[in-house]
Amino acid sequence: MLDDGRLTRRGALALFGLAGLTLTGLAGCGSGRDAPAAAPSPVPEPAPTSADAAWAALAAGNERFATGAPRHPHEDEPYRESLVDGQHPIACVLSCADSRVAPELVFDQGLGDLFTVRSAGEVLDDAVVGSVEYAVEHVAVPLVVVLGHAGCGAVQATVDVVRGGPAPDGSIAALVRAIEPVVRGVATSADDAAYLADCVEAQARSAAAALSDASPIVRAAVAAGRTTVVAGVYDLESGRVSQL
């Protein structure tokens, strides 16, 4: 294997092969005990089929998120593959488009758990209502949550206009026009933060009520007891969602 004091190529390969065998053998040896078996995959919990059970699941997930102990469920490859043939979300969440209000994170849910629709200020238009209708009619969600949030920019822009400020540019003005009747119906307050919070709650309630008014499909599902529509507000600071 040595040629004039140097390691030949054939010798090097032989040594490396021997080293590989030795390391492999060592890796398979422990303290005389077999390596522990991989932990079995957890058995999935049955999906909620009622509005109360769905809300309980969302509330529990939100508590995990708010306390810094999220599970991040349903993100692994086997679960992803299980969704190829269909979806069975536990709820539809209509939330603001604000980047800080991601329903799957806020409620600590995963792939296939939520049918999410997002619109700045939870403003309803044909596409938004149609998306909720699809969740109710074709995916059969037992719960629809309209989720407003603290410090909503769309509601704040509307408050500014109601107080005499200029209308925003572009199609943002359409959002303000949609929210304006709600804001004008809220009693004014000298406390700007409290007034905005009241307007945010009023907008979430209004959008939840308007879903049934705007959609015969949603209204029929609610009347038949197949679906419940609720409003809630997400607090940016605490991370908690409160049902209104």
Image: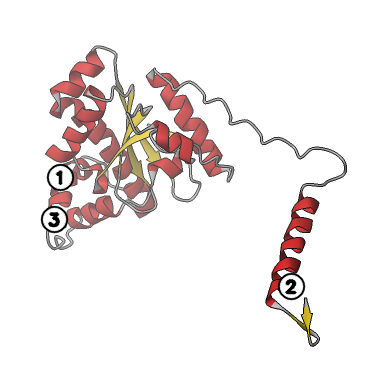
- Quick one: label 3 or label 1, which is nearer the N terminus? 3
Per the model, the C-alpha gap separating discs 3 and 2 is 78 Å
Per the model, the C-alpha gap separating discs 1 and 2 is 80 Å
- Quick one: label 1 or label 2, which is nearer the N terminus? 2
Circles 1 and 2: CB atoms closer than 8 Å: no
Q: Secondary structure beneath disc 2?
A: helix
- Quick one: 2 or 50, which is closer to the camera? 2
Pointer 3: what residue?
173
Whether residue 27 sits left or right of residue 239 in the image: it is right
Residue 38, horizontal then vertical, whole percent? 67, 36
* Residue sitting at x 51%, y 47%: 238
Pointer 2: what residue?
11
Whether residue 34 sits left or right of residue 45 in the image: it is right
Q: Is residue 93 visible?
A: yes
The amino acid sitting under disc 1 is: Ala
Q: Secondary structure beneath disc 1?
A: helix
The amino acid sitting under disc 3 is: Ala
* Residue sitting at x 33%, y 29%: 87
Q: Mark 1 or 2, which is nearer the eye?
A: 2
- Quick one: 183 or 10, which is closer to the camera? 10
Q: Secondary structure beneath disc 3?
A: helix
- Quick one: 188 or 18, which is closer to the camera? 18
- Quick one: 18 or 185, which is closer to the camera? 18
